[in-house]
Image (cartoon, rainbow, N blue to C red):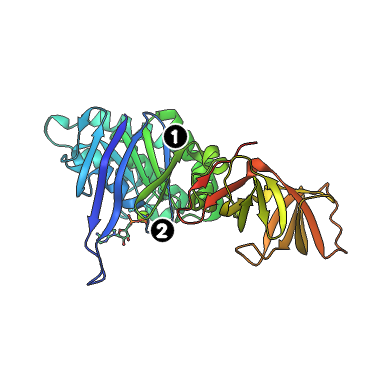
Amino acid sequence: MKVVLKELTKRFANRTKGQPDVIAVNHFNIELPDGKLIGLLGPSGCGKSTALNLISGLEIPTEGQVFFEEDDVTKLPAEHRGVGLVFQNYALYPHLTVRQNIAFPLGNLKGDQKLPKEEVERRVEEAARLVQIDQLMDRKPSEMSGGQQQRVAIARALVKQPKILLLDEPLSNLDARLRLQTREELRRIQRETGITTVFVTHDQEEAMSISDLIIVMKEGVIQQVDEPQKVYTDPVNLFVAKFLGTPEINVFRGTVRNGQLFLGEESVLDVPGVEDREVYVGIRPEGFILSETGRFTMDLKRVEEMGRDTSVIAAHPAAEKPTVRAIISSENEVDRTKETVKFDIKPFRTYLFDIETEERIPFGG
Ligand code: ADP
Ligand code: MG
């Protein structure tokens, strides 16, 4: 099911008295395509949960509309929207078995929605199989790991055969290994069911690894909507460039003169088509090429060997941070006796941004 958000806005009175209202979701205009896994990504407090709650019906918007396909569901209560919800804390009923927990939402159905007992059992089995928990049906939540409990919570959301699945940081309570495993599971379940799924996370790597489409938001405002790789390689602004990628992008203050980018006194890259101006410059760690004749000189701090790759830790007066990290293939030999190190930089891993707006400035070449 396609979801369309039009001018969707949620304003809260500030929790701190005397402070202005918080616009948790600010004029969202977006279409979430049918059958895709959409990652809603942004730092803590940027409005991800509020956006999700507006889609589910747990929150009513201050302004704007929510459509499921052509239907305006803005005023429809959550229980009639046909959405499945999963939260960070699994919120299972501790005194019920896995089977009873999964069946619970079906027991609440009233009138002609009520299902025959056999159909309930069939659906519960099916949901349990899908999340691979069907061997543990008679256990209580306390007898299971966090990952297993979260699978039960997912099965419980699936048992009503929702048209949309909404997941709010569903992996945050799991340890690192389970988090990796469970996110692959989620991807598989989403593919198998084809349910339009919105997955909220503040973890860029998590969003990158499983999403078909990523929405990056900041302070209630959508910044960019793109395929994961595109958000990384083609960020629209400095915020997105910094938020995606580990290690983080290196940021410098630079100047463009006569179609050349200067960092300090050196002309480090040709940037045809850009007028003379001050800029922020983002260079991805993999955007450096070690070269004795390189145009960009930095102070060499140390070298970290990491198997396949080598990190060169350097410093430069125009850099925003005390150290700059360049990641190069370990086949390169870095001369550690020298005080400086020279690089060329890759134009397609280097980005220019306006100093005021922090919007991306395109360059040719
Ligand atoms: P996220 O899920 O990205 O961490 P939230 O959607 O929970 O962000 O919150 C976005 C902003 O809205 C935050 O500033 C938060 O304090 C505020 N907020 C959320 N819910 C309420 C509420 N019920 N009352 C007042 N402010 C709220
Ligand atoms: Mg949240």
Q: Secondary structure at mark 2?
A: loop
* Nearer the observer, 247 or 97: 247
Ligand 1 lies under 8 Å from the Cβ of mark 2: yes
Between the C-alphas of marks 1 and 2, the distance is 26 Å
Label 2 Cα crowd, 10 Å radius (few <14 / some 14-19 / many 20+): few
Residue 35 pos. (x, y %): 39, 29
Amino acid type, callout 2:
Ser
Label 1 Cα crowd, 10 Å radius (few <14 / some 14-19 / many 20+): some
Residue 285 pos. (x, y %): 67, 51
Q: Which residue is mark 1?
A: 189
Chain-order first, disc 1 or disc 2: 2
- Quarter of the picture for ligand 1? bottom left
Residue 50 pos. (x, y %): 30, 51
Q: Which residue is mark 2?
A: 44
Q: Are marks 1 and 2 in contact (CB under 8 Å)?
A: no
Quarter of the image with the C terminus is: top right
Amino acid type, callout 1:
Ile
Tell me where residue 125 sits by quadrant.
top left
Q: Which residue is depicted at the point 44% across and 29% down?
A: 192
The answer to whether 162 is drawn above or below residue 320 in the figure is above
